[in-house]
Image (tube, coloured by chain):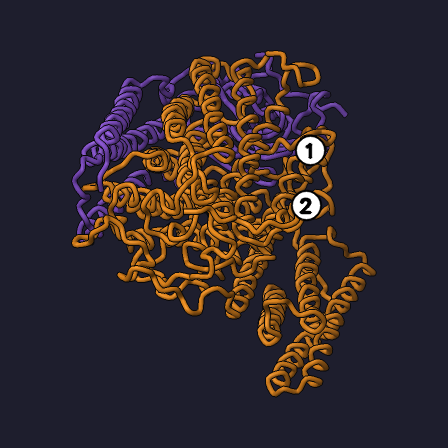
Amino acid sequence: MTRSAAISPGSIRSRVFSTDHKIVGLQYFFLALAAVTIGIILSLLMRFHLVWPAAHLPFITGGIMTPEQYLALVTMHGTIMIFFVLTTAPQSGFGNYFLPIQIGAPEMAFPRLNMLSFWFTLVAFLCVLAAFAVPGGAPISGWTAYPPLSGLGEITGPGEGLGQTLWIVGILIFSAASVLGSLNFISTTIDMRAPGMTLMRMPLTVWAWFVTAILSLLAFSVLLAGGILLLLDRSAGTSFFIPGNLVVNGEVQGHGGGSPLLWQHLFWFFGHPEVYIAILPGMGLVSSILANFSRKPVFGYRAMALAICAIGFLGFLVWGHHMFVSGMNPYSGLAFSLLTVSIGVPSAIKTFNWLGTLWGGRIELRTPMLFAIGFVSFFVTGGLSGIFLAQPAVDTMLHATYYVVAHIHLVMGVAAVFGIFAGTYFWFPKMFGRAMSEPLGKLHFWLTFAGVYCIFMPMHFLGVAGGIRRYADPSGAKYLLGLQPLHGFITVAAFITAAAQLIFFWNFFRSLKSGAPATANPWRATTLEWATSSPPPADNFGGKFPCVYRGPYEYSVPGESSDFLPQNFSGQQIPPSSPAGGGIPQRVYRTGVLMLLAGVAMFFMALVSAEIVRRGFSSDWQQLDLPWRIVALSTAILVASSVTLGWSRSRLRAGDEAGFRHGWLVTAILGLFFVAGVGLAWRQLLVHGIGIASNPSSSFFYVFTAAHAAHVLGGVVALAAVLIRPLRRLSRRTAADVVTLYWHGINALWVLLILFMLLER
Amino acid sequence: MNRSRQHARGSATAAFLLALVLTLLVAATVFAFAAHIFPAPAPITDAAVLVDQQYARTLYVAGAVFVLAQLGLAFAVFRFRDRGAPARFSRGSVPLEIVWTSITLIVFVGLAVAGRKAWAMDRYTPPAPDAIQIEVTEAQFVFTFRYPGPDGKFGRLDPSLVDAPAGNPLGLDPNDPNGKDDVVSATLTVPVNRPIELLVRSQDVVHNFDVRELRLQQDAVPGMMIPIHFTATKMGSYAIVCTQLCGLGHNKMNAELRVVSESDYRAALEPTSGVAPPVPSK
């Protein structure tokens, strides 16, 4: 089998700024590889410091690591690993590469948006890393960034000045990139499946990427809202999260009435779905690999698909289990507890079904299979420690101890990472047309499997004995010294395990250069990516797009001569190709804009919830004297613009080009008038001395109107684009439909916002 | 499918090794937990005993699942290694799924419900009406405890008066008569077998109040005054730590909880004992 070029040879520019989803996927993957290297180094510095806090380190000014430097390491380690490794590699890396191929599509729905998402993510990464280099250094508030520690600037500690600001900005850029990326995944999965690829024939990887993308869309929209509010508290004098009468370093702070718990609610409403974003793709992949290397279908495929959906859905309802001792209403604690243990049910279903897949199989322990089995083992262990933390009475003992660190690392830092390893070993031949070394892969597995259990199992005991997390050293309470032997053991295991990862890097890069050539289907697998060459051609299938005739895991089907049936195998010698394959259908744009509106709605719902909570938290709420005349006029203008837009579209349908263009232009101008109206309303308030920081109701008014106006301006740009420069793939009819949907959606949002402001008087 | 015997033998070794490692994992884990290595210190309240009991219940359930799942994995990997025979085709079993899903649901929800009492005792039931109220103020990186004194009333605090170097870390208002008999201390001294209500607050960032032996912790949130309560049944000296990341001094932020006899407690709060209420300087 000859190797065809993965990407058509071209200029550096076309390769670096490629819109080919395979290139974008690899870019994300290598970003994650760089990030995990940095993240591991940070963790080794932390582990070293915990055992030898007084050691002289050559690269630190002053020689000895200070507590704030340790805390900066903690913060950046968590941030880099969770965002730039676990949210990136499984979903944006492998998902971008393989989702279109596994559903028989030539491309993602929005290739240029996809490319943009990657570059935003890279900028976000550099922005976060830049925090190390500025005066004061990286922030020390943890990846959770609780205000007021993160909300008051430098006076709360080193790194809380520019470092924290860069961190927040970087995370906001990452959030925006994730939302944009999720639009691609959702639209592609819904609208671009090959003929015969019904939902119930999708590989579980596709199910996982799809549900994860929905989680991403909704969760990161909320983080965007929270992060913007935190930035405003830091720089505009608002008090969303900062209460009054704070005394920091002897100085009374000028804020008032904000709720630190509001940040925690917003953050964890994002934060809990985030961890399912990190693990769901790995779960889908493990199912596929277990089936492949057991030569059996996935046990209970339908239940597995439903479990992915259930985990995704329930993941939005449990965020309070991070807040049992936060000062939250204790009755909520019971509610969150019951919901949290309920997530254990679909997770248990998946575990049983993985065992069921192995049962009666013909198991071949190649490297991807070893890592998939490792995933199951770690997910069981890590998931079970979650049951302790899910109960508030027990959590009262274990909260913020190393027990939590054990739990989160076993499920994320180990299980999810084993998913990434499994994916790498499994898909390397497909992506690069070369094989990785099996012996090195197996050695990597054995050392890592044993190593990470040695690192994280002892942490449970540390936690039960009262070892507190994020402690730079044991110089505080005396009992901590008695726990040092555990820390010593963990640190030694950490260094050995980290060293073992060098085997993986060596194997990976050496095989890239000189691995044995790989065939199209070295694992004798059934899903569509194995039906094309290794690596796939630029359009994924060389012009011969597949039709799908069967489910994704037809292994060892009785009566068949082969122990596997590819999904595109029709029974004929040469599988017929799809007559309609190869394009991007116009309906993806409709799906995309509807999903975008869902994300925007979620963003504004987060702000509305924030206002409701903030209002109830403190007695400093002052009813804002809204400039009602201007607001009413602006609303009327906006509603009129929807009318003119509707008229304009009817003119387009009737073929009246001039009428269409006039109506369209009028709509855009009305939109600009609306934005001007908002500006006038602001001017009116400012004239009366009411700025964004004057009181909480004014803060929210400015935030709501600014955020909404920004979306209207975006709509105006889109309107102009339809008239001036049509996109290559978009018919003007589709573009007009899509922009109309967006415009009406944004206007409806404004009406709802006004209603909300009226109702809460 | 033909595969060489050498390949099959290699696979048998790997299967055996994996099964062995998983079994060793189970053995080591069960042993370590059963041997109570690095145990939590003994609980000193009845509520803490309930917490320990719920922890133990959860440990038995989780432990059983852990053992069964990891050994199940080990067995499956070894028993069903490639020995030449084709795999047993199966798409699954709906009855089996219903059974193990129901069992999981009942067990997990049952566990959560069983833990209700421990949480309720902590959080739903208020303290006894005669509980001793003590205010806990946390700031970067210090615990300060305040007793209301014989009048039972806390004096007014004014943030603009906060001046720790001058001896007024809480900002006590010298003009408020209620505050004249307040006792401010760096140590939390309580009498044994008396209900205690702690009013937890923070001056700057989110902190936390945590005593292992109480099996109780509470975040100290600025802008809020959060009550928790306990009744200590064993005298002794216990560490109070802050578990919520609060800045560079986070790990050094600790204090002492002293549970003493009734008479020692009264003596500790007397002016003559040396723990004098501070006179806030102008």
Q: Nearer the viewer, residue A431 or B237?
A: A431
Return the chain for callout 2: A
Residue type (three-letter) at the residue carrying disc 1: Val
| Disc marking residue B141 | none
Return the chain for callout 1: A
Colour chain B appears in: purple
- Chain seen in orange: A
Residue A97's x, y, as percent? 49, 49
Question: At 65% across and 45% down in the image, what residue appears?
Answer: A230
Q: Nearer the viewer, residue B106 or A640?
A: A640
**Same chain check for tags 1 and 2:** yes
Q: How many marks?
A: 2
Question: At 62% across and 31% down in the image, what residue appears?
Answer: A140
Question: At 65% across and 82% down in the image, what residue appears?
Answer: A648
Q: CA distance from mark 1 to mark 2?
A: 21 Å
Describe residue B61's horizontal placement relative to residue A190 as left or right: left
How would you rate the neighbour count of disc 1 (Cα within 10 Å): few for under 14, some for 14-19, many for 20 or more?
Answer: many
Q: Secondary structure at mark 1?
A: strand
Describe residue A64's horizontal placement relative to residue A555 as left or right: right
Describe residue A91's horizontal placement relative to residue B280 as left or right: left
Q: Is residue A591 visible?
A: yes
Mark 1 or mark 2, whichever is nearer to me: 2
The residue indicated by pointer 1 is A247
The residue indicated by pointer 2 is A231
Relative to A722, say whether B233 is above or below: above
Which quadrant does the C terminus of chain A fall into? bottom right
Q: Secondary structure at mark 2?
A: helix
Q: Is residue B232 visible?
A: no
Residue A91's x, y, as percent? 48, 47
Q: Nearer the viewer, residue A425 or B48?
A: A425
